Each structure stands twice: as C-alpha cells, then as structure tokens.
Amino acid sequence: MTQSNVSSTPEHGTEFLPKYDAHGLLTAVVTDYDSNAVLMVAFMNAEAVASTIETGFAHFYSRSRKKQWRKGESSGHVLAVREILTDCDQDALVLRCKPAGPTCHTGEKSCFYRRLGDGRLERLPA
C-alpha cells in the first residue's frame, strides 16, 4: 500500500470518520483520566459526538428516552473530556475524563462497582 492510500483509510488516516451502527450509534467507554479506571459505558450519536467535541463535556444518546443528554445535567456530576480515543475502524470511542463527583446514577464512583464471582455479584472494595 502506498503512503497516499494509507493516509486515506479510516484505519491509518488522520481524518475522523466515525462508523455509526445501523441505529446511528457508537459505543463510548468512559475512563478516569488520572487512574484509567473504567467509569461507564454509553452510546453516542453524531449529535452527542459533536456536542462533546464542541463543549468539552461528555454528551451521550439515551436509547430508552431517545434523546441526547449531557452527563451531569441534573446531578452536576459532569465529565470533563480530556482526550478522545477511537479504535482502528472508528466504531467505538474511549472518553478519558475528569469526573466532577460520582459517575454512576447510583452514587458510586464508577458504574463498575461489582464483580461476578461464583455466579453471584460481589461488591468491590472501595
């Protein structure tokens, strides 16, 4: 493959060409910028991606409510986006964020506060 062909493909190029699924969504994994802990997983449509890039705060698409929302719009626990990573074929994103308070709607720091062991969920140590 020539250099010009490499730079024009989503896998090797420099152009952001998100590959949305049949529902117009990407999977977004949110991690803590400092610790790299996984905080949450959500979905983003083109509007949520654009709003996130424009404002610097994480926006997502609610599949159940069928609308865009900004994380922390009611709780104040926003996610300040410090870096956006995309996978090789640009159908998933990682948002590296500085959270302002708990990320989970339950009040937990992360939505991943339990692990599966012996067929049951057990709470992770704080």
Image: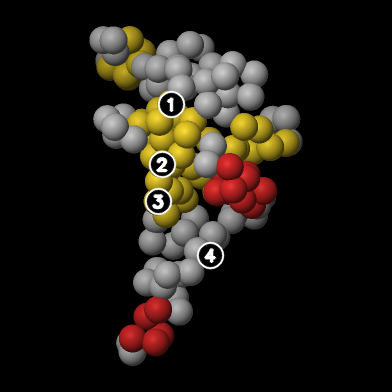
Q: Extreme bottom residue here?
A: 2
Q: Are marks 4 and 3 in contact (CB under 8 Å)?
A: no
At mark 4, the secondary structure is: loop
The local crowd at label 3, few if under 14, some if 14 to 19, many if 20 or more residues have their Cα within 10 Å, is few
Q: Which residue is mark 2?
A: 82
Alpha carbon separation for disc pair 3 and 1 = 17 Å
At mark 2, the secondary structure is: strand
Q: Please, is residue 48 above or below residue 17 in the view?
A: above
Can residue 43 be seen here? The reply is no
Q: Which residue is mark 4?
A: 17
The residue type indicated by label 3 comes to Leu
The x, y position of residue 25, in whole percent, is 60, 48
Q: Which residue is mark 1?
A: 99
Alpha carbon separation for disc pair 4 and 1 = 27 Å
The residue type indicated by label 1 comes to Pro
The colour scheme used here is secondary structure
Tell me which label, 3 or 1, sits earlier in the chain: 3
At mark 3, the secondary structure is: strand
For discs 2 and 3, the disc positioned in front in the rendered view: 2
Q: Which residue is mark 3?
A: 85
The x, y position of residue 35, in whole percent, is 27, 30
Q: Is residue 117 left or right of residue 56?
A: left
| Residue sitting at x 32%, y 19% | 116
Q: Extreme right residue here?
A: 66
Tell me which label, 4 or 1, sits earlier in the chain: 4
| Residue sitting at x 45%, y 17% | 102
Q: Is residue 89 left or right of residue 65?
A: left
Alpha carbon separation for disc pair 2 and 3 = 10 Å
